[in-house]
Amino acid sequence: MFEYAGLGGLIVLALDIWAIVSVLGSNRSTGAKVLWTLLILVLPILGFIIWLLFGPRSARTV
């Protein structure tokens, strides 16, 4: 199992929080938001990378 400690762990935590906030602010359905959030929480680094490539973005107003 991976162990995240120190500065690396803090960076992973900050990126995961940013991803989760972005998912929750997106226009996706509640089910999709729950699945993306679980993926990011269960697989912190891999889940973040998958979200970064394929995940929903937060709704932006122009």
Image (cartoon, rainbow, N blue to C red):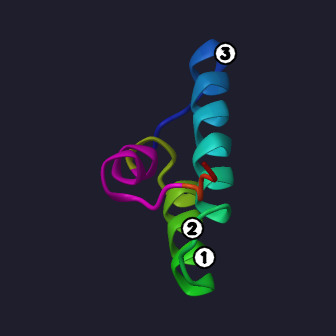
Q: Main secondary structure of the magenta part?
A: helix
Q: What kind of residue is marked 1? A: Val
Q: Nearer the viewer, residue 62 or 5?
A: 62
Residue in view at x 56 percent, y 86 percent: 31
Q: Position of residue 41 (x, y in %)?
A: 59, 57
The amino acid sitting under disc 3 is Gly
Q: In the shown orientation, is residue 46 left or right of residue 40?
A: left
**Relative to 1, does residue 38 appear above or below in the rendering?**
below
Tell which tag, 1 or 2, sits nearer the viewer: 1
Write the residue at 64% across / 13% down: 7
Q: Nearer the viewer, residue 46 or 36?
A: 36
Q: What x and y, as percent, mark residue 24?
A: 67, 64
Q: Nearer the viewer, mark 3 or mark 1?
A: 1
Residue of label 2? 38
Task: Name the secondary structure under disc 3.
Answer: helix
Q: Quadrant of residue 12?
A: top right
The alpha-carbon separation of the residues under discs 3 and 2 comes to 24 Å
Looking at the image, which residue is at 43% across and 52% down?
47
Q: Residue under circle 1?
A: 34
Quickly name the residue at label 3.
6
Q: For marks 3 and 1, give the CA distance.
A: 28 Å
Earlier sequence position, callout 3 versus callout 1:
3
Q: Residue 45, how many percent across, how many down? A: 45, 41
The question of residue 55 being in magenta is answered with: yes
Per the model, the C-alpha gap separating discs 1 and 2 is: 6 Å
Asked if the residue at tag 2 contacts the one at tag 1, i.e. Cβ–Cβ closer than 8 Å, the answer is: yes
Do residues under tags 3 and 2 come within 8 Å of each other at their CB atoms?
Answer: no
Q: Residue at x 68, y 52 (%)?
A: 21
Q: Which residue appears farthest toward the front when viewing the image?
A: 62
In magenta, the rendered stretch is 47-57
Q: In the image, is residue 15 above or below residue 30?
A: above
Q: Does 19 appear in magenta? A: no
